[in-house]
Every structure is written in structure tokens, then in C-alpha cells.
């Protein structure tokens, strides 16, 4: 049971990591838009 809980916790961490990755991609997109705006 503790092992299963560990596995679920790890999956939650991976999901949070995916969200972080998507957030970083959004930041990059906003940065690109700002670059184009400056040009």
C-alpha cells in the first residue's frame, strides 16, 4: 500500500512537471510575441 501511494505520488509529480513544461512553453510564446512587437 505504501508502495502504491509512492507510485501515485510520483505520477502526481510527473503531472506537475508536465504543467511546468507547458507553462514554460507559454512563457516562450509570450517572449516571441514581445520580440515581434519590438520589431
Image (cartoon, helix red, strand yellow):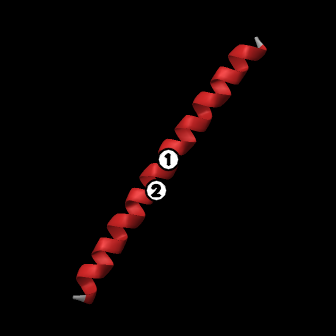
15 in relation to 39, above or below: above
11 in relation to 25, above or below: above
Q: Residues within 10 Å of mark 2 (few under 14, many from 20)?
A: few
How many numbered discs?
A: 2
Q: Quadrant of the C terminus?
A: bottom left
Q: Residues within 10 Å of mark 1 (few under 14, many from 20)?
A: few
Q: Quadrant of residue 14?
A: top right
Residue 19 placement (x, y as % from top left): 49, 47
Res. 19 mark: 1
Q: Secondary structure at mark 1?
A: helix
Residue 37 placement (x, y as % from top left): 26, 84
Mark 2 and mark 1 residues within 8 Å of each other at the beta carbon: yes
- C-alpha distance separating marks 2 and 1: 6 Å
Q: Residue at x 36, y 73 (%)?
A: 31
37 in relation to 26, above or below: below
Res. 38 mark: none
Q: Residue at x 60, y 33 (%)?
A: 12
Q: Quadrant of residue 4?
A: top right
7 in relation to 21, above or below: above
Residue 7 placement (x, y as % from top left): 65, 21
Q: Report which residue position mark 2 lands on.
A: 23
Residue 29 placement (x, y as % from top left): 33, 65
Q: Residue furthest top?
A: 1
Q: Quadrant of the N terminus?
A: top right
Left or right relative to 28: residue 5: right
Q: Residue furthest bottom?
A: 38
Q: Secondary structure at mark 2?
A: helix
Q: Residue at x 58, y 29 (%)?
A: 11
Amino acid at each position: 500500500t505504501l508502495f502504491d501511494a509512492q507510485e501515485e505520488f510520483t505520477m502526481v509529480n510527473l503531472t506537475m512537471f508536465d504543467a511546468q513544461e507547458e507553462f514554460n512553453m507559454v512563457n516562450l510564446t509570450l517572449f516571441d510575441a514581445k520580440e515581434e512587437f519590438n520589431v
